[in-house]
Image (cartoon, grey):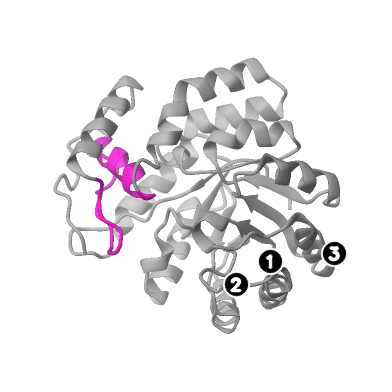
Amino acid sequence: METTGCGTAIVTPFRADGSVDEPALWALVNWQIESGIDFLVACGSTGEAATLEEDEWLNTVRIVVEAAAGRVPVWGGCTHNSTKTLVRQANLLKRVPGLSAVLSANPYYNKPTQEGQYQHFLALAKAVDPLPVCVYNVPGRTGANLEPETVARLAASAKNIQAIKEASGKISQFVELAHIMPRGFKIFSGDDNLALAAVAEGAHGLISVASNEIPRECTQMVRAALNDNWSEARELQRRFSQLFDANFWESNPGPVKTILNLMGRCSNHMRLPLVPPLPTTRTRLERLAGELGLLKHVPLPVGVRSEVY
């Protein structure tokens, strides 16, 4: 896998009737690429994949790939806590023309052992081979940590397991991964606020939430760090550190969708059990977005009313 830099875990916009807003998604993809993003991840956690029907999920990945039109790599999210279902869905996903890689998080709720996670991800890798796989360690959402030794075992067992999105929040795991993983294996931070620390320890980039709102600036920050321009990287991190935190003032992607709505780029509609942020949180987000200059060129607001479907 050659991909490095900053990738956006792109949101999935919804219309007021709850359907996927395909024109808004297409426009978001174009804006991301025009802003210089290095790659895109469709239907991850930020893309509300857990509430998409199977046909919607597959179509959303197709839209992102088609809109990107080869200009940047596109990864498709494919996560399930049943290995059998994961393999079936992976066989559907790998047929999407132009898809660059598959991103898959730990099996959620089951809390499998390291051996269970090894067997789960190995089955996925075999199902999509030769498409590259990026395993996604996010114990805060799944209840299970994927230990570095297991990642090394996976990479040794399946040549197409080529990357990890590490979102345990533990710098020690980045250190160990950078030490034990083979040359060419890519390590990405899954946390915006740990991106620079991760790169300093040997990571190759960031899969970002905040780059939905600030794709140019997030990409500049990560590239600066990768190029050892730490003064620029730290300045950008300082400037946007409150935004990195604000995106989790309430459950992701509620805050990021709210800011995108304030920017006029998509609605803030979400699907239950997720709901838009409270009015008080929206007011705080609007104030912060204004202070950061994100609302300078706002077209007529889209979907101002917060509704849940």
283 shown above or below 257:
above
Residue 156 is tagged as: 3
35 shown above or below 50:
above
Label 3 amino acid?
Answer: Ala
> Residue 155 versus residue 116: which sits nearer the camera?
116
Label 1 amino acid?
Answer: Leu
Mark 3, Cα crowd under 10 Å, few <14 / some 14-19 / many 20+, is some
> Residue 241 versus residue 219: which sits nearer the camera?
241
Query: On the picture, is 54 further left or further right than 205?
Result: left
Label 2 amino acid?
Answer: Lys
Q: What element does badge 2 sit on? A: loop
Q: Position of residue 259 (x, y in %)?
A: 30, 38
Q: CA distance from mark 1 to mark 3?
A: 16 Å
- Which residue is labeled 2 in the image? 94
Q: Quadrant of residue 293?
A: top left
Q: Position of residue 196 (x, y in %)?
A: 63, 31
| Of marks 3 and 2, the one in the foreground | 3
Q: Main secondary structure of the magenta part?
A: loop
Q: Residue at x 60, y 17 (%)?
A: 232
270 shown above or below 222:
below
Q: Quadrant of residue 245?
A: top left
Q: Quadrant of residue 160?
A: bottom right
Identify the mark nearer the N-term, 3 or 2. Answer: 2
All told, the count of numbered labels is 3
- Which residue is labeled 1 in the image? 131
Q: Are discs 2 and 1 less than 8 Å apart at CB? A: yes
